Image (cartoon, rainbow, N blue to C red):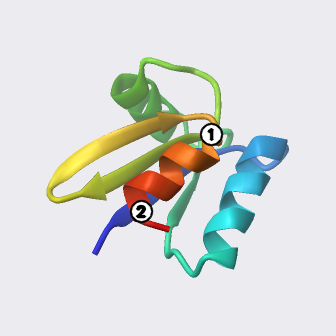
Amino acid sequence: MNKVTVYSTPTCPYCLQAKAYFKENNVEFKDIDVAADEKKAEEMIHKSGQMGVPVIIIEKDGKEEVVVGFEKEKIAGLLSL
């Protein structure tokens, strides 16, 4: 099973779209609010090299795939949706 983590902020429209997409497709995910957690924000920047949200981490076959932004087609491919 794939593990999905979404680094987001409450006001980001693309974050909301990504989370709605996961819910619509019954994909469980962990949501991390980087506006409220500075350490998690630093973790996101370290993993992605980006300060913008959303940053979506999909753990597949023991390997982390980093998706910056809500790239629906890329996400669908990684999750086989």
Mark 2 lies on a secondary structure that is: helix
Where residue 55 sits, quadrant-wise, is top right
Give the residue at mark 2.
79
Q: Nearer the viewer, residue 70 or 81?
A: 81
Is 8 placed left or right of 44 in the picture? right
Q: Position of residue 78 (x, y in %)?
A: 39, 54
Amino acid found under the numbered disc labelled 1: Pro
Q: Nearer the viewer, residue 78 or 63?
A: 78
- Give the Cα distance between marks 2 and 1: 17 Å
Q: Which residue is drawn at the image coordinates 44% and 53% (left, top)?
A: 77
Q: Residues within 10 Å of mark 2 (few under 14, many from 20)?
A: some
Is 70 placed left or right of 47 in the picture? right
Of callouts 2 and 1, which one flags the residue occurring earlier in the amino acid sequence?
1
Q: Position of residue 8 (x, y in %)?
A: 64, 45
Callout in the foreground (2, 1): 2
The reply to whether dot 2 and dot 1 touch (C-beta < 8 Å) is: no
Q: Position of residue 41 (x, y in %)?
A: 52, 33
37 in relation to 75, above or below:
above
Where residue 48 sits, quadrant-wise, is top left
58 in relation to 71, above or below:
below
Give the residue at mark 1.
54
Mark 1 lies on a secondary structure that is: loop
Amino acid found under the numbered disc labelled 2: Leu
55 in relation to 26, above or below:
above
Q: Residues within 10 Å of mark 1 (few under 14, many from 20)?
A: many
Where residue 7 sits, quadrant-wise, is top right
Image mark for residue 66 = none
Is 39 placed left or right of 1 in the picture? right
Q: Quadrant of the N terminus?
A: bottom left
Q: Which residue is drawn at the image coordinates 68% and 61% (left, top)?
A: 19
* Total numbered labels placed on residues in the image: 2
